[in-house]
Image: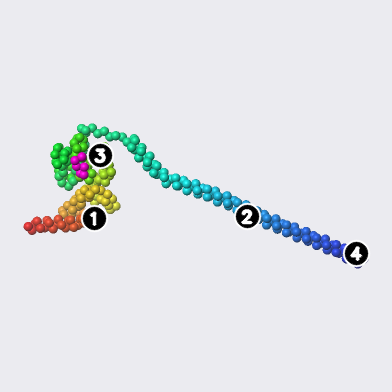
Amino acid sequence: MANKKTTKNDKVNELKTEEKHEELNKNIETKSDEKAKIKIEKIEISKKDLEFLTKEIAELKEQINKQAAQINKPIEVIKDVVEFTLEDEEIVDIPLNRNIKIISLYNGGLTLFTQDHGQGKKFRFEKFGDIRTIQYTDLEACIAVQYKFFEQGYVMILNKDVVKVHGLEETYNKLLTKKQIEEILTYDDQTVEILFKNTTDHIRRVIVDMIVENMLNNKYVDMNKVQIINKYYTRDINEIVAFFREAQRTDKEG
């Protein structure tokens, strides 16, 4: 009887042992499955990241290609504009008998001639700001003989068509008007600098002559603006004034 009980106990123990093994195996399988799932999730996430990065790289490449294309675009646009301008530019026909106004921007008397060496017709300007009306046929001759006067701004043509026909547009962008010359010291510092720096040598001389004259006559002059002008002139304005004052003093003593 004792042996039979032992056998039953052994069987019970064996069953319990088998159940424990089964449970343990299930736990191991569950953990293995979980690990497998984690690995799969990691792989899936990596694939998504890769797809995202691939898309980003493709978009960046597209942007780079667009920017590279834009580099050459301005050249093509400029070329198109130039060609369009040359093809469609209107030919200005100015009647030879048209009267054209000319203003003198020279401090003193000035004469235009239609022929070399002071020959031909003469057109006299007595002072700065004088305006004369000249027929285009005569003005053409004056421009041919004294081109520098028109280029530097000794005189200014008050007709945009004539300026265009004679290729003076770029030069005339540098010239100042009579009003700008006379009122240059009333502008702000930056405007004074831009106007004086970018104009012609002749216009600079005219402006300096006017400043010197005002200083010699003891008129108010903004010396801060004078210092700005001094930076772009060949001589110091104060030295010019001192020279003329010394000359005046010597004349009085003599």
* N-terminal label among 1 and 3: 3
Q: Quadrant of the C terminus?
A: bottom left
Q: Residue furthest toward the bottom? A: 2
Residue at 25% over, 55% down? 231
Q: Is residue 135 left or right of residue 190?
A: left
Q: Residue furthest toward the right? A: 1
Quadrant of residue 233 within the rendered picture? bottom left
Instruction: Determine if residue 187 is in view.
Output: no
Crowd tier of the residue under label 3, counting other residues whose Cα lies within 10 Å: few below 14, some 14–19, many 20 or above: few
Q: Position of residue 110 (x, y in %)?
A: 16, 44
Residue at 90% over, 64% down? 4
* N-terminal label among 1 and 2: 2
In the figure, 71 relative to 8: above or below?
above
Q: Position of residue 51 (x, y in %)?
A: 57, 49
Task: Return the residue at label 1.
Answer: 230
User: What amino acid is at disc 3?
Assistant: His
User: What amino acid is at disc 1?
Assistant: Asn
Q: In this view, does 15 lie to the left or right of 163?
A: right
Front: mark 1 or 3: 3
Task: Return the residue at label 2.
Answer: 42
Task: Return the residue at label 3.
Answer: 166
Q: Do the residues labelled 1 and 2 touch (CB within 8 Å)?
A: no
Q: Are marks 1 and 3 in contact (CB under 8 Å)?
A: no
Residue 85 belongs to the span the image colors magenta = no
User: What amino acid is at disc 4?
Assistant: Lys
Task: Return the residue at label 4.
Answer: 4
The magenta stretch spans which residues?
Answer: 144-149
Q: Where is residue 212 in the image (x, y as percent from the top left)?
A: 18, 53
